[in-house]
Image: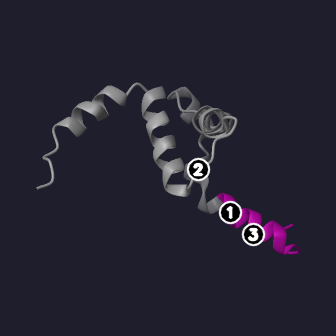
């Protein structure tokens, strides 16, 4: 089929070039998430629930910082960040 179809040639090339990335059974056995559901859920948890609250208005920098803070809070790394920040020297 690849001899007659450019799309078939492109598909063969794609799969050949990405064979190492498509070892889904091995990744699942190692406990990795391979679907998009976990990413979509993370976006909902981090972005939608905090940044889309009623009446909220954000500029880009504020939204990015808030999303980073929420991600740290939800991943239980907030205290580590607070402690690390307190160890930084003050500007003179």
Please give the label number shown on residue 25. Answer: none
Single out the mark in the foreground, 3 or 2. Answer: 2
* 21 left or right, relative to 77: right
Q: Which residue is mark 2?
A: 58
Residue 2 appears in the picture as rendered: no
Per the image, label 1 sits on a secondary structure element best described as helix
The reply to whether dot 1 and dot 3 touch (C-beta < 8 Å) is yes
Question: Would you call the spot at circle 1 few (<14 residues within 10 Å), some (14-19), or many (20 or more)?
Answer: few
Of the 4 image quadrants, the one containing the C terminus is bottom left
| Residues rendered magenta in the picture | 1-15
- Distance Cα–Cα, label 2 vs label 1: 40 Å
Q: Which residue is mark 3?
A: 10
- Distance Cα–Cα, label 3 vs label 2: 43 Å
Please give the label number shown on residue 14. Answer: 1
Q: Residue at x 83, y 69 (%)?
A: 7
Rendered location of residue 36, percent (x, y) = 67, 40
Near-viewer residue (49 or 72): 49
Residue at the limit of the structure toward the front, as seen here: 55
Number of labels in the image equals 3
Rendered location of residue 13, percent (x, y) = 68, 66
Q: Quadrant of residue 38?
A: top right
Q: Residue at x 28, y 32 (%)?
A: 82
Per the image, label 2 sits on a secondary structure element best described as loop
Per the image, label 3 sits on a secondary structure element best described as helix
Residue 31 appears in the picture as rendered: yes
Q: Is residue 8 above or below residue 24?
A: below
Question: Would you call the spot at circle 2 few (<14 residues within 10 Å), some (14-19), or many (20 or more)?
Answer: few
């Amino acid at each position: 089929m690849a001899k007659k179809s450019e799309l078939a040639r492109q598909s063969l090339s794609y799969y050949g070039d990405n064979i190492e990335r498509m070892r889904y059974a091995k990744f699942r056995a190692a406990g990795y998430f391979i679907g998009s559901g976990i990413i979509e859920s993370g976006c909902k948890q981090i972005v939608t629930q905090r940044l889309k609250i009623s009446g909220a208005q954000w500029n880009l920098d504020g939204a990015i910082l808030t999303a980073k803070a929420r991600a740290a809070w939800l991943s239980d790394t907030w205290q580590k960040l607070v402690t690390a920040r307190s160890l930084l020297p003050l500007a003179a």
